[in-house]
Image: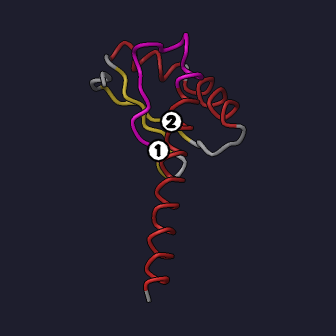
Amino acid sequence: MAERINAVINDVINSLSKGRLLSEEIERAWQDAALGVLKGHAKAAAFKDGRLLVTVDSSAWLYKAAFCKKELLDRLNDKLGDDRVKKIDFKIGAING
C-alpha cells in the first residue's frame, strides 16, 4: 500500500514539475520574442490550451502589441521550436513583479 501511495505522489510531483517547466519555457520564449518590440511594457500572464495571455501596461502598448501579433506569434513559436502557441491575446494591467 505504501508503495502505491509513493508512486501516486511521485506521479503528481512529476506532472506538476513538467507543467511548471513548460510555463517557464514559454515565459522565457516570450521574453526573447518580445525583446525590442514590447520590452518593458508586456509580460506573459497565462498559457492554456494553446492560448497565451499577455499583459501590457497601457492602451498604447495594447495597440502596438495587436499590430505586431502575427510577428510575435511567429517569433515565439520559432523560439519554442514548435507551434504550441496558437493564439496570443492581450490585456491591459500591471506588469511589475
Specify which label sits upstream in the sequence, 2 or 1. Answer: 1
- The residue sitting at the bottom extreme is 1
10 left or right, relative to 76: left
Identify the amino acid type marked 1. Phe
Membership of 43 in magenta stretch: yes
Which disc is residue 47 wearing? 1
Disc 2 residue crowd, few under 14, some 14–19, many 20+, Cα 10 Å: some
Nearest the viewer among 59 and 13 is 13
Q: Can you give x and y, in whole percent of width and height, for residue 86 in the image? A: 59, 43
* Percent of width and height locating residue 19: 50, 52
Residue linked to disc 2: 88
**Residue at position x 36%, y 12% in the image:** 60
- Image quadrant assignment for residue 80: top right
Query: Range of the magenta residues?
Result: 31-47
Which image quarter: residue 95? top left
- Front-most of residues 66 and 32: 32
In the foreground, 20 or 78: 20
Q: Are marks 2 and 1 in contact (CB under 8 Å)?
A: no
* Secondary structure beneath label 2: strand
Label 2 is placed on what type of residue?
Ile
